[in-house]
Image: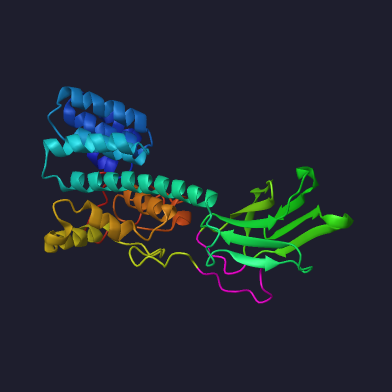
Amino acid sequence: MSSNPYFLILHHQYEQALQLLVSDDYETLVTKSLAYYHLGKYEDALVTLDKAIQLSSNRFEAYYRKGLINFISGKIQQAQLDLQKSLELNPQHKETQQQLLKCELELKNTKLIQTAQEKKIQQLKEVPQNNEAERTDIYSASGKLMYKWYQTDLKVGIEIHHALPNSGDLKYQFEKQRLQLSFPIEKGNNFELDLDLFAEIIPESSKAKVGLNTIEILMDKKDKTLNWSNLQKKVEEQQQIPVMEQASYPTSSKKKKDWSKIDKEIEEDINKHKEEYGEDPLNSLFKQIYQNGDENTRRAMIKSMQTSGGTVLSTNWDEVKVKDYERKDRPSPPKGQEYKKLG
């Protein structure tokens, strides 16, 4: 076994490296935290880094590594504080600058998602009655009972204009692409609705409500990006139309990208268009990268880039969430280079 802990870490022999990292000096503690990180022992790594900071609080490395670990652990606000301290101690450290920018992007993205969700909930509560682009009048076969349908990004709703004194008289059943309901109307007759829906819904969370003069059906879309062009499925299946255009950057392709190259291109673009970015390039950069992406796209970008050590950029969350870029799925480094994690 090699007596060099750095060599052992480089060759993924983390337990063996820890056996050699027994000193309590600053450099040894920081290196020891790296071995803990690779073993997935994040709490041990953070405790070790705190010890290093107690020994030398005017050095940036321990704060930088704390920021990375807290970011990966989902503690974005704490990661931001750690990285700000690191940058304060070493303003020229580009890796800290980049990681701090990613924290700010993630925090802003979280705020945007929360705001968008609140807005959609409010829109669902206040669906405009005269929005002909989103509401369509449909009559039953008898020509007597009218109902309307509408949609938001999250739900599809049906309003049936009928006063039903006893809510228990409403019978309904949701299936993944079908709605069945019935209730009594005048003269002992029943109103029945049996629809093969345009697209799939989530039956478990869909519901029906009986109001004073209306019966309202609320169905949760399974695909939140799909705009229903009709309430019912046509005989010939129509092509699904996404609500948002496919993002031009970054793409959702599974093709792996060189994040360091992208970082360089971003930096060059900021320097070239300083007058457009202003003093704070964050807003413009965020708009470029995140404007057209959904929540999973952004989560995939952050996790793939972070856990791969900056060598993979993917926007496919279904792929990224099961990948282990730190170990078995780690890409090979470019020819002539060595693979290193966390700076």
Viewer can see residue 23: no
- In terms of depth relative to the viewer, which is nearer, 147 or 46? 147
**Residue at 52% across, 51% down:** 126
Quarter of the image for the N terminus: give it: top left
Count of numbered circles in the view? 0
Depicted 96 relative to depicted 331: above or below: above
**Residue at 18% across, 34% down:** 85
User: Residue 83 location, x and y as percent?
Assistant: 22, 38
216 with respect to 40 (left or right)? right
Quarter of the image for the C terminus: give it: top left
Q: Which residues are magenta?
A: 225-241
Q: Is residue 228 magenta?
A: yes
What secondary structure prevails in the magenta region?
Answer: loop
214 with respect to 239 (left or right)? right
User: Residue 75 location, x and y as percent?
Assistant: 35, 36
**Residue at 25% across, 26% down:** 50
Depicted 121 relative to depicted 192: above or below: above
Q: In the figure, residue 252 lies in which quadrant?
A: bottom left
